[in-house]
Image (spheres, rainbow, N blue to C red):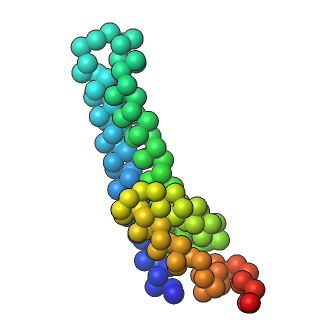
Amino acid sequence: MQVHLDVLGWLHVLVGWVALLTGTAFLMLAGGTASLAPRVLEEIVRNPVVWILFVSGLLLAAGGGLMVAAGRAVVARRPYGRQATLLLAVVNLCLLPFGTALGIYSLWVLLNDDARRAFGRRLRASA
C-alpha cells in the first residue's frame, strides 16, 4: 500500500502543476483580452469573456495549488494530507475523465485500514 500512497501523492502533485499552469494561462488570456480590446475601460469591465477567463484562471490556480499541497502531504504522510486528498477526491469526481479516475483511485487508496495506519489514524471497527 505504501507504493500506492506514493503514486497517489505524485499524481496529485502532477495534476496540481498542470492546473496551476492552465490557470496562469487563463489569467494571462484575461489580461491580454482586456488590454487588446479597443474599448474604454468601462466596456472592458463589462465584457463577460474577460470575467469568465479571470474567474476560471483563479479557480484553476487555487485548485492546482491545493492539489500540489495535498499531494506533497500524502507523500510525507502528514495526517492532514489524507483528509485534504479525500476532500479533493470528491471534487475531482466531477471533472471528467481524468479527475474522475484520480478521484476513484484516491478514494480506493485512502479509504482502507492500511492507509489509515500509515497516517496514524484509528482503524475501522471490524464487523
Taking 50 as reference, is 2 left or right?
right
Can residue 34 be spotted in the picture?
A: yes
What residue appears at the point 31 percent right and 23 percent down from the top-left corner?
34
Q: Quadrant of the C terminus?
A: bottom right
Residue lying farthest to the bottom in this orientation: 127
- Tell me residue 109's x, y (percent): 52, 79
What residue appears at the point 35 percent right and 56 percent down from the top-left corner?
18
What residue appears at the point 36 percent right and 35 percent down from the top-left corner?
53
- Residue 1 to residue 100: above or below: below
The quadrant in which residue 43 appears is top left
The quadrant in which residue 57 appears is top left
What residue appears at the point 73 percent right and 90 percent down from the top-left corner?
126
117 or 89, which lies in front? Answer: 89
18 or 102, which lies in front? Answer: 102
69 or 94, which lies in front? Answer: 94
- Tell me residue 70's x, y (percent): 53, 63
Residue lying farthest to the front in this orientation: 127
- Tell me residue 114's x, y (percent): 60, 86
64 or 97, which lies in front? Answer: 97
- Residue 60 to residue 79: above or below: above
- Tell me residue 117's x, y (percent): 65, 84
Can residue 70 be spotted in the picture?
A: no
